[in-house]
Image (spheres, grey):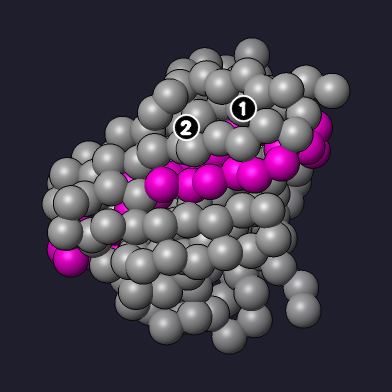
């Protein structure tokens, strides 16, 4: 099945800083989603982005499907951005999402 | 509208007990997924329903795990004779079209602790 790897595993930011999170996947994807898991464990949808670029406020994401990677950009980070960011993908073979190991982000005031 | 809901939010079981975890998907969503998330890890797929049909149960870790969705709406994940290694957060997700090219929406999860 598809493999998903995220980097870096941990990220410490000062409030106001910008950052880039990376997701590499091993095969063609039909679905790629970015999630933010808050301290209470809820997985919050950020982007559905199997290809192209999307922006939502201070967050944006780009997926280059031909090169099998996706990037999540956080600009002007805030303490509420802290948590774990997951990338998840499903390939042509089925619907189930395969998650990466996550990037744990801590934004310090 | 209402999102995916799960109950109970927390469950403590003694080793050997049976547990049942419930998922209410978003109304009208065709597909329903169960995932297991161990501490410090990403979620891992357990099983998938399209309406009432269980189309993929390749992720269920043992025959102690059983899932059903008899009327194509609410789903129950049952774990028999719980073991300590079953301790995890169990997440349910649903999507509209039953296709891979569709956003999955997740519930808040049930945190299971087996003592």
Residue A17 placement (x, y as % from top left): 67, 32
- Split into 4 quadrants, where in the image is the C terminus of chain A? top right
> Can residue B55 be spotted in the picture?
no
Q: Residue at x 69, y 60 (%)?
A: A57
Task: Report if residue A86 lies within the magenta region.
Answer: yes
Label 2 sits on residue? A102
Task: Report if residue B46 lies within the magenta region.
Answer: no
- Separation (CA) of disc 2 from disc 1: 9 Å
> Can residue A104 be spotted in the picture?
yes
In the displayed structure image, the side of residue B27 where residue A27 appears, left or right: left
Q: Residue at x 49, y 47 (%)?
A: A72
Of B93 and B104, the residue lying toward us = B104
Secondary structure of residue under mark 2: loop
Looking at the image, residue B17 lies above or below residue B4: above
Of A63 and B92, the residue lying toward us = A63
Of A85 and A51, the residue lying toward us = A51
Disc 1 is attached to a residue of which chain? A
In the displayed structure image, the side of residue A28 where residue A80 appears, left or right: right
The magenta segment is A71-99
Q: Which dot, 2 or 1, sits closer to the camera?
A: 1
Q: How many marks?
A: 2
In the displayed structure image, the side of residue A29 where residue B33 appears, left or right: right
Label 1 sits on residue? A105
Looking at the image, residue B64 lies above or below residue A54: above
In the displayed structure image, the side of residue B91 where residue B49 appears, left or right: left
Instruction: State which quadrant residue B55 falls in.
Output: bottom left
Residue B48 placement (x, y as % from top left): 37, 61
Of B71 and A24, the residue lying toward us = A24
Q: Residue at x 27, y 57 (%)?
A: A64
């Amino acid at each position: 099945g598809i493999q998903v790897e995220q980097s870096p595993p941990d990220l410490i930011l000062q409030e106001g800083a910008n950052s880039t999170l990376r997701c590499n996947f091993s095969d063609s994807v039909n679905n790629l989603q970015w999630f933010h898991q808050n301290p209470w464990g809820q997985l919050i949808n950020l982007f559905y982005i199997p290809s192209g670029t999307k922006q939502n406020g201070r967050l944006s994401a780009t997926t280059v499907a031909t090169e099998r990677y996706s990037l999540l950009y956080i600009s002007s980070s805030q303490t509420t951005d802290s948590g774990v960011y997951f990338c998840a993908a499903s390939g042509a073979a089925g619907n189930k999402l395969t998650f990466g190991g996550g990037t744990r982000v801590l934004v310090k005031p | 509208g209402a999102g995916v809901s799960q109950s109970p939010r927390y469950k403590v079981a003694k080793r050997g007990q049976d547990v049942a975890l419930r998922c209410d998907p978003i109304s009208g969503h065709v597909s329903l997924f169960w995932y297991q998330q161990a501490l410090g890890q990403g979620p891992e797929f357990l099983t998938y329903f399209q309406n009432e049909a269980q189309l993929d149960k390749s992720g269920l870790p043992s025959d102690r795990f059983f899932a059903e969705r008899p009327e194509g709406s609410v789903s129950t994940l049952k774990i028999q004779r719980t073991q300590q290694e079953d301790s995890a957060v169990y997440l349910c997700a649903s999507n509209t079209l039953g296709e891979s090219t569709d956003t999955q929406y997740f519930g808040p999860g049930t945190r299971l602790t087996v003592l």
